Amino acid sequence: MQRRHFLRSAGFAAAALSSGGILAREGALPAANDALAAGVPKPPFAPLPPLAPIRASADRIVALDVCTRPFRAQGPRIEAERVGRHTVIHHYGHGGSGWSLSWGSAEQALRLVAAARPRRGELAVVGCGAIGLTTAVAAQRAGYRVRIYAKERLPDVRSFLATGVWSPSSRICTTRFATPEFERLWEAMARTSFHTYQTLLGLPGEPIEWRDGYSLSDVPFNQPSGGGGEDEEPDYPHLEGRLLRDIGPRAVALAPSQHPFPVPYVRRYTQMTFNISAYSRMLMADFERAGGRFETRAFGNLRELADLDERVVVNCTGYGARALLGDDSVIPVRGQTARLVPQPEVTYGLTWRGHNLYTVPRRDGILVQAQAPGDFGNPDTTPDRAAAEAMVARLASLFPQA
């Protein structure tokens, strides 16, 4: 592959910019309309800008992280339990959809909070990950006074290590539990969250962005890829494709002349991404500005939640609920990511079917993720440097070498 496929001249774009003043001059648009009416062909729009190559090499790995997603086959647990004089609202078990569903899920949990009628409007939230912090901010907006109790807070929690993409149906439940009732609940949570995220676009630090990406395949997309990596996992329902088709851009197939990748089949997609570092700090700042308070505290069992001053407690402990409550329905799913040195010029993600490769162009670096056999049910959070370097080498094979 020629390097010029990635670094084509930007002359077309420069020409388009240089003509911008013409449109601003008085009479320019009527003149253009007159020319069109006379049969004069319009000049073409500038083509899409060229794709900058990802500098994928092991020496550019600046972070290697492993976390455990809190998967529940039944889907998230959102229900109230009476513990002595306290009401505990359980709100955990979102699998790989925590950030994506956080606002809509918080809305569901707050309905139970309202039914419990916290005295003096005081509410405790236990846990400071994606679900806990978002629930706390949503509760403040609903008029509650909130204190977060947590052993750790962002960025020192599992949620901070997430991939950071809109994935509302990622390991949310198994096909067995995807009942019509659950699907209605999931759709409501997803739509609420999606709407909320659209109100956060364009803020300082770009906490939420839309990014293009490219799906690559060695075989037609309607054929099995032959790749492994998730063979030991259960079957998940395809909720997003069936229930949210109206709120996201569709992927489009590209001809070989429309992309630079050394594979025969390519689709371009557009995906919402979370720059988790900026986004989590924004939530923390919002929580504190609204009078929220943090208290560092660890809990050993459910009874200890009933020792809190607040009579209504929202339990947002994620994977921690497995030990806190003895809830074996929470299953760990190991996930490892490698982060490469940031490249502001790289604004696209990649998915390579059959090669178990996925990248996300975040502001804090290019995230490279891979799912490995044995990750499902695996609580081990020890980083595997060799596996990370193998993924980066696989990524490098897609680009011309300098």
Image (cartoon, rainbow, N blue to C red):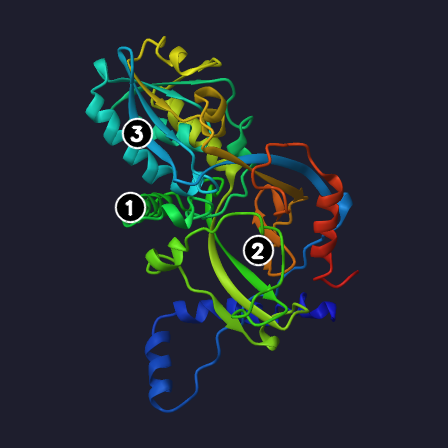
Whichever of labels 1 and 3 marks the residue nearer the N terminus, that label is: 3
- Residue 214: give x, y in percent of width and height: 56, 62
Which quadrant of the figure has residue 242? bottom left
Which quadrant of the figure has residue 79? top left
Q: Nearer the viewer, mark 2 or mark 1?
A: 1
- Tell me, yes or no, whether the two marked residues, 2 and 3, touch with CB atoms within 8 Å: no
Mark carried by residue 349:
2
- Residue 55: give x, y in percent of width and height: 71, 53
- Number of residues whose C-alpha sits closer than 10 Å to that of mark 3, classed few (under 14), some (14–19) or many (20 or more): some
- Number of residues whose C-alpha sits closer than 10 Å to that of mark 1, classed few (under 14), some (14–19) or many (20 or more): some
Q: Amino acid at mark 3?
A: Glu
Find the distance from the CA under tag 2 to the CA under tag 3: 37 Å
Indicate the secondary structure of the residue bearing disc 2.
strand
Label count reads 3
Mark carried by residue 188:
1
Q: Is residue 120 visible?
A: yes
- Check the picture and name the quadrant holding the N terminus: bottom right
Indicate the secondary structure of the residue bearing disc 3.
strand
- Tell me, yes or no, whether the two marked residues, 1 and 3, touch with CB atoms within 8 Å: no
Mark carried by residue 79:
3
**Residue 146 position (above or below residue 379):** above
Q: Amino acid at mark 1?
A: Ala
Which quadrant of the figure has residue 90? top left
